[in-house]
């Protein structure tokens, strides 16, 4: 009874002091849901006492003042009413715990009879009744009346046209619900949202369509009776796919939350966008009747050509039309109607007559050239570029266009008749060389010239065809150079340097005589020569244009030649017998019938005879050095190729490695030039300039290692530190200290000569120490004394540390041959025995001292205690009467 009163008093004090009051909450109602759709009702409890995990009971009543029906409980598995048992067992009705204090009632498919007042109860676990223990929410179940229909889309649409997506979304309004409509585009396995309208009148666009909606290229047009239209302006090929319309019915619950209660999707159809390039066609023709693709005009007449354009979406296109003559732009009408002339007055063919361009109707563009001349002849084509505006019409497009297609018409051939001049040519050799390096002179004479216009001039073009066998490309014809009607020199690519340096020359010595001169003839100059004379006349703009050209009969030049020869000998200067040494090779060049020359040197190698060849270094005739593409950039400083004399070259390879073993040789080519600023010309074929092969062959002898273990003392007492040093000695080709590293491990054997050995500690080659688990009170540490010595310390030694110790080391060294870290063989030291002695006197001294001290102390304490007791506790204070006998004795005395 006293405990009960105390409990009540404590509860009252907690309530007075502001204790928590239980709060059970459910969503604010009413909740409007649709038949056959899932329903979820959340319930949570806060500010409660007792266990963290709370139980919940769900009940409902279909009408007011009617007894509630038990639905489901988190605690009682047989809580459900008999009418709901099957639905609970099938999972149609279930409860899901979201947290310890939060559950959710789930109805998989709502039915009309599920409408009613739902009650969430939480059994009390509080010591004091406080707050609310249940909450109610009204559930309204309405019929599914949502309907989504759409208009059928065309199967194909032209690029640049407008596409209207019509979707009708309706429902019977029995409760305050709202509608939204959205359109999406499917491509393959992905679906992209285009635009969503509603439920509260807002518009949300997909990520790829935000810019187009802002530009007005996508427009929403809500209609009456649930009709919604989405207009996509200026469609492109990216708009192809399957379009789908989605209608959704929403409810707006208390608290400002929109809930989707039912949705329908309707596939509208598949649309293919026909690219503009498929329907665009361009045709060029003359305006004559009937139109023709071949036109013959006399000088001074008018040239008129018509460009006809057709396309499936022509009204949606903006066109840029260009007329071309012989592949060159002459005039363009831009998209905005501005005409731009592209005719050049400085062309080699001369200046064309002025041209005009105008638009004729919706699909025609007419070119007019007044007073044609001979240079106006050629092939004319019409090129059309079709552009589509990216932005919507309502936004004005923002000036953003993209080119959808480009087409060029078939050519129209225009010929302008003329009377060509006639003449005869004679090509002769004035100076004929007998051997290489002698001068050569050729003359091209023009005779019997007729019909050359007043002010007309002559030009010349020289060509050379090589003899078979003199070059790798037999019978190759090359342009030497030409003189046009103005006398300008136009050199060929192969002869440009020789003509500019003066080694060769093209001149007009008389109005009808042209000469070609060589100061020093080379072997490659043998062959056939042709001169071509061209006539030039002044056109109606006062410019010189070429009117005719005739070619001479070929003239062959040949003479006796003594082919130069070149030999290369390689010899070893420094032998590389060990890894890291330096290898040096000399290449000596000897020549015959060559004269002054410079040399291009290639140092080449191969691992073995017959294996692939790689180029190590090259030295150009101008002494410019380059490394081969296969050479490691880190080793380029070890490679040297120098010209030690006029005909000797030296190659040096420092720090040779195993990968450098193989055969090395020189590949030399002789080059000559006639003038200092002239380009180099090969004088000897590459095949005759390869030296003998010098071999690098050595075996790597790495350093030798040995190991020893040493201990300053073999006996220690408990709690002392024992030290054992493991030392590695290096002999042979000792690497640098930075090029050495060790992996050291220590092993322990408890009994002398026993086979059971355990690893106690280790240090890797990067200095990381690892200790194994030991069932001992002592501790271990490893320290590095110097580059080759490591010490194992046993701190606070214990008798369990007695036994044999030895170390195992694995050396690593940086190989001078391979340039890589190499692992040497494992080394095992001898064994040392460590004894941890137990000192008897030292161990007994302190306990004996404590015992003697305790004994003396106890004795003294006992003595003092006895005296105190004798004086205080055991003393008899009663009077003892005298003996009568003694009195009697005294009296007698």
Image (cartoon, helix red, strand yellow):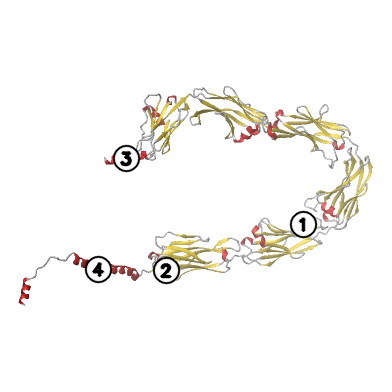
Q: CA distance from mark 1 to mark 3?
A: 118 Å
Q: Neighbour class for label 1 at 10 Å: few (<14), some, many (≥20)?
A: some
Q: Is residue 813 left or right of residue 413?
A: left
Residue at image coords 28%, 67%: 854
Q: CA distance from mark 1 to mark 4?
A: 123 Å
- For label 4, the SS is helix
Q: Is residue 95 left or right of residue 518?
A: left
In the rendered image, residue 765, in percent from the top left (x then y), is placed at 52, 61
Q: Earlier in the sequence, mark 1 or mark 3?
A: 3
Above or below 508: residue 334? above
Residues at discs 3 and 4 in contact (Cβ within 8 Å): no
Q: Quadrant of residue 843?
A: bottom left
Q: Nearer the viewer, residue 847 or 343?
A: 847
Instruction: Kindly tell me whether residue 91 is visible in this rendering.
Output: no
Circle nearer the viewer, 2 or 4 = 4
In the rendered image, residue 692, in percent from the top left (x then y), is placed at 71, 63
Q: Quadrant of residue 739?
A: bottom right
In the rendered image, residue 865, in percent from the top left (x then y), is placed at 22, 66
Q: Earlier in the sequence, mark 2 or mark 1?
A: 1
Q: Earlier in the sequence, mark 2 or mark 4?
A: 2
Q: Nearer the viewer, residue 683 or 717?
A: 717
Residue 685 - label? 1
Q: Earlier in the sequence, mark 3 or mark 4?
A: 3
Query: Which residue position is annotated with label 2?
Result: 833
Q: Neighbour class for label 4 at 10 Å: few (<14), some, many (≥20)?
A: few
Query: Which residue position is annotated with label 3?
Result: 9
């Amino acid at each position: 009874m006293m405990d009960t009163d105390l409990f009540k008093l404590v509860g009252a004090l907690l309530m007075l002091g502001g204790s928590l009051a239980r709060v059970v909450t459910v969503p604010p109602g009413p909740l409007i849901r649709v038949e056959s759709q899932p329903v979820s009702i959340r319930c949570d409890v806060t500010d409660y006492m007792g266990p963290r995990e709370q139980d919940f009971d769900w009940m409902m009543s279909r009408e007011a003042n009617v007894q509630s029906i038990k639905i489901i409980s988190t605690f009682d598995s047989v809580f459900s009413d008999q009418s709901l048992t099957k639905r609970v067992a099938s999972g149609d009705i279930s409860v899901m715990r979201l947290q310890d204090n939060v559950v959710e009632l789930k109805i998989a498919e709502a039915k009309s009879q599920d409408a009613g007042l739902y009650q969430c109860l939480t059994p009390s676990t509080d010591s004091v009744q406080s707050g609310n223990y249940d909450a109610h929410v009204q559930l309204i179940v309405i019929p599914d009346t949502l309907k989504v229909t759409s208009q059928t889309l065309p199967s194909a649409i032209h690029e640049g046209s407008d596409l209207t997506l019509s979707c009708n979304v309706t429902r019977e309004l029995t409760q305050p619900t709202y509608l939204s409509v959205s359109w999406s585009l499917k491509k393959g396995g992905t679906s992209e949202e285009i635009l969503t309208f509603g439920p509260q009148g807002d518009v949300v666009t997909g990520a790829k369509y935000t810019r187009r909606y802002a530009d007005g290229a996508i427009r929403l047009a809500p209609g009456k009776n649930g009709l919604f239209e989405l207009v996509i302006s200026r469609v492109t090929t990216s708009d192809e796919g399957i379009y789908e319309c989605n209608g959704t019915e929403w409810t707006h619950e208390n608290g400002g939350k929109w809930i989707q209660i039912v949705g329908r999707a309707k596939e509208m159809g598949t649309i293919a966008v026909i690219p503009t390039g498929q329907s665009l066609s361009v045709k060029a023709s003359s305006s004559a009747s009937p139109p023709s693709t071949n036109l013959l005009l006399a000088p001074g007449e008018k040239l008129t050509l018509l460009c006809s354009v057709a396309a499936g979406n022509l009204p949606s296109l903006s066109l840029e039309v260009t007329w071309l003559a012989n592949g060159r732009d002459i005039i363009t009408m831009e998209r905005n109607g501005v005409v731009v002339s592209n005719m050049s007055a400085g062309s080699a063919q001369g200046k064309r007559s002025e041209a005009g361009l105008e638009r004729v109707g919706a699909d025609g563009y007419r070119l007019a050239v007044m007073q044609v001349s001979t240079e106006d002849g050629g092939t004319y084509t019409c090129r059309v570029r079709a552009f589509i505006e990216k932005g919507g019409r309502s936004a004005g497009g923002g000036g953003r266009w993209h080119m959808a297609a480009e087409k060029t018409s078939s050519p129209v051939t225009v010929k302008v008749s003329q009377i060509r001049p006639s003449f005869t040519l004679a090509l002769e050799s004035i100076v004929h060389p007998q051997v290489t390096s002698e001068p050569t002179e050729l003359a091209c004479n023009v005779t019997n010239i007729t019909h050359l216009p007043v002010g007309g001039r002559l030009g010349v073009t020289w060509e050379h065809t090589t003899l078979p066998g003199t070059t790798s490309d037999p019978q190759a014809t090359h342009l030497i150079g030409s003189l046009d009607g103005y006398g300008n020199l136009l050199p060929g690519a192969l002869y440009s340097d020789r003509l500019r340096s003066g080694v060769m020359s093209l001149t007009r010595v008389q109005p009808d005589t042209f000469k070609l001169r060589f100061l020093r003839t080379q072997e490659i100059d043998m062959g056939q020569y042709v001169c071509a004379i061209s006539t030039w006349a002044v056109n109606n703009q006062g410019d010189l244009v070429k009117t005719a050209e005739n070619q001479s009969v070929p003239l062959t030049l040949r003479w006796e030649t003594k082919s130069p020869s070149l030999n290369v000998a390689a010899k070893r200067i420094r032998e590389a017998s060990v890894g890291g040494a330096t290898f040096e090779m000399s290449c000596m060049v000897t020549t015959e019938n060559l004269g002054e020359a410079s040399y291009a040197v290639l140092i080449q190698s191969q691992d073995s005879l017959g294996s692939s060849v790689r180029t190590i270094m090259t030295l150009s005739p101008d002494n410019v050095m380059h490394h081969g593409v296969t050479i490691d950039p880190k080793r380029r400083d070890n490679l040297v190729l120098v010209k030690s004399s006029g005909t000797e070259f030296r190659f040096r390879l420092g720090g040779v490695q195993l990968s450098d073993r193989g055969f090395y040789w020189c590949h030399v080519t002789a080059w000559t030039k006639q003038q200092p600023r002239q380009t180099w010309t090969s004088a000897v074929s590459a095949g005759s300039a390869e030296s003998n092969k010098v071999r690098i062959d050595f075996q790597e002898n790495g350093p030798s290692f040995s190991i020893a273990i040493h201990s300053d003392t073999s006996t220690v007492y408990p709690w002392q530190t024992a030290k054992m040093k493991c030392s590695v000695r290096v002999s042979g080709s000792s690497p640098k200290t930075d090029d050495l590293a060790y992996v050291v491990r220590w092993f322990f054997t408890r009994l002398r000569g026993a086979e059971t050995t355990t690893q106690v500690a280790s240090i890797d080659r990067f200095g990381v120490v690892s200790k194994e688990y030991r069932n001992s009170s002592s501790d271990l540490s490893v320290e590095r004394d110097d580059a080759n010595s490591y010490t194992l310390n046993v701190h606070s030694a214990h008798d369990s540390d007695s036994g044999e110790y030895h170390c195992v080391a694995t050396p690593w060294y940086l190989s001078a041959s391979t340039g890589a870290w190499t692992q040497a063989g494992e080394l095992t030291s001898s064994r040392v025995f460590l004894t941890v002695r137990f000192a008897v006197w030292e161990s007994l001294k302190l306990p004996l001292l404590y015992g003697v001290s305790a004994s003396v102390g106890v004795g003294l304490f006992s003595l003092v205690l006895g005296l105190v007791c004798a004086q205080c506790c055991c003393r008899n204070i009663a009077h003892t009467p005298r003996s009568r006998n003694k009195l009697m004795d005294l009296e007698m005395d």
